[in-house]
Image (cartoon, rainbow, N blue to C red):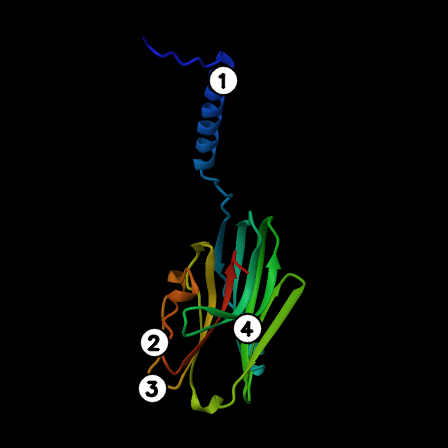
C-alpha cells in the first residue's frame, strides 16, 4: 500500500509565495546602486603680471584653475602633506557643496625661516595652513609645480605640488596622472606637499 502525505493547499501557496519573495529580495539586493557622478573640468589660468610682481614681493608662488561644471556630491579643497606610507596628512580643508560652479580657485605657497605656508582662495573664502621645519636649510627646494592643461576632473585632483628634498636630485611628475595619494612618488629624504580637490575628506 502506498503511503500518501497530505499537505494543505494553503501551505503550498504560502511556500510558493515565500520562495518568490526570497527570489525577488535576492534579485533586488544584487542590483548595483549607481551614484551620481560629478561632471566638471579644471582649467589652468594664467597669472597676470601684477599678480606675479606681488607674489615675488611676498616671497610666494601662486597658481589658479577654473572649476567649471557640476559637483553632484560634496568635495573638499585640501592642503596636504604626502607620507611614506602612501597616505596624506591634511593641513587644512574647505568644503564645496554640491551645485554648479564656474569659479576660480587660487592657491599659493610661501615660506620664511622654518615655516612653510599654503593658502587657497575661493570666492570670499580664504584659508591658510602651515608646517614648521626644524632644519629647513637641510633641504633643496624644487619649488611648486602646477597643472599644465585642462582636464576632466577625477575623484582626486592634484592642483599644485611643492617639493623639498635632502637628496641632490629631485624628479618631477605629471600632476594630471595623480588619482590618489599613493600615486605621488615620495622617496626617502623628500617632503612633498599639495593642494587637492577631492570627493574624500
Apparent side of residue 179 relative to residue 11 in the rendered image (left or right):
left
Secondary structure state at the residue bearing disc 3: loop
81 or 100: nearer the eye?
Answer: 81
Q: From this viewpoint, which residue is outermost toward the front? A: 1
Where is mark 4, residue-wise?
108
Query: Label 2, on which residue?
Result: 171
N-terminal of the pair, mark 3 or mark 1, is 1
The answer for how far apart the CA atoms under marks 4 and 1 are is 73 Å
- Dot 4 or dot 2: first in sequence order is 4
Q: Nearer the viewer, mark 4 or mark 3?
A: 3
Q: Residues within 10 Å of mark 1 (few under 14, many from 20)?
A: few
How far is mark 4 from mark 2, CA to CA? 21 Å
Which of the two discs, 1 and 2, sits closer to the camera?
Answer: 1
Secondary element under disc 4, as helix, strand or loop, is strand
Identify the residue under disc 1: 11
Earlier residue among tags 1 and 2: 1
Quarter of the N terminus within the rendering: top left
Mark 3 neighbour class, 10 Å CA radius: few under 14, some 14 to 19, many 20 or more: few
Quarter of the figure with residue 27: top left
Q: Residue at x 52, y 86 (%)?
A: 133
Tell me, for residue 54, which label it has, or none: none
Tell me where residue 120 appears, x and y as whole percent.
Answer: 58, 68
Tell which circle, 4 or 3, labels the residue nearer the N-terminal end: 4
Amino acid at each position: 500500500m502506498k503511503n500518501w502525505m497530505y499537505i494543505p493547499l494553503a501551505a503550498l501557496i504560502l511556500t510558493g509565495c515565500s520562495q518568490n519573495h526570497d527570489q525577488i529580495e535576492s534579485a533586488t539586493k544584487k542590483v548595483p546602486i549607481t551614484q551620481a557622478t560629478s561632471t566638471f573640468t579644471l582649467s589652468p589660468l594664467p597669472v597676470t603680471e601684477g599678480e606675479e610682481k606681488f607674489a615675488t614681493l611676498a616671497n610666494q608662488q601662486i597658481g589658479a584653475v577654473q572649476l567649471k561644471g557640476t559637483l553632484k556630491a560634496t568635495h573638499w579643497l585640501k592642503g596636504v602633506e604626502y607620507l611614506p606610507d602612501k597616505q596624506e596628512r591634511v593641513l587644512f580643508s574647505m568644503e564645496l557643496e554640491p551645485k554648479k560652479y564656474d569659479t576660480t580657485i587660487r592657491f599659493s605657497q610661501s615660506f620664511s625661516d622654518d615655516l612653510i605656508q599654503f593658502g587657497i582662495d575661493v570666492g570670499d573664502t580664504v584659508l591658510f595652513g602651515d608646517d614648521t621645519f626644524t632644519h629647513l636649510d637641510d633641504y633643496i627646494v624644487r619649488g611648486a609645480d602646477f597643472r599644465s592643461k585642462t582636464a576632466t576632473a577625477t575623484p582626486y585632483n592634484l592642483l599644485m605640488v611643492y617639493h623639498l628634498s635632502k637628496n641632490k636630485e629631485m624628479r618631477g611628475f605629471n600632476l594630471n596622472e595623480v588619482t590618489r595619494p599613493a600615486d605621488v612618488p615620495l622617496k626617502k629624504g623628500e617632503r612633498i606637499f599639495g593642494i587637492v580637490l577631492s570627493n574624500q575628506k
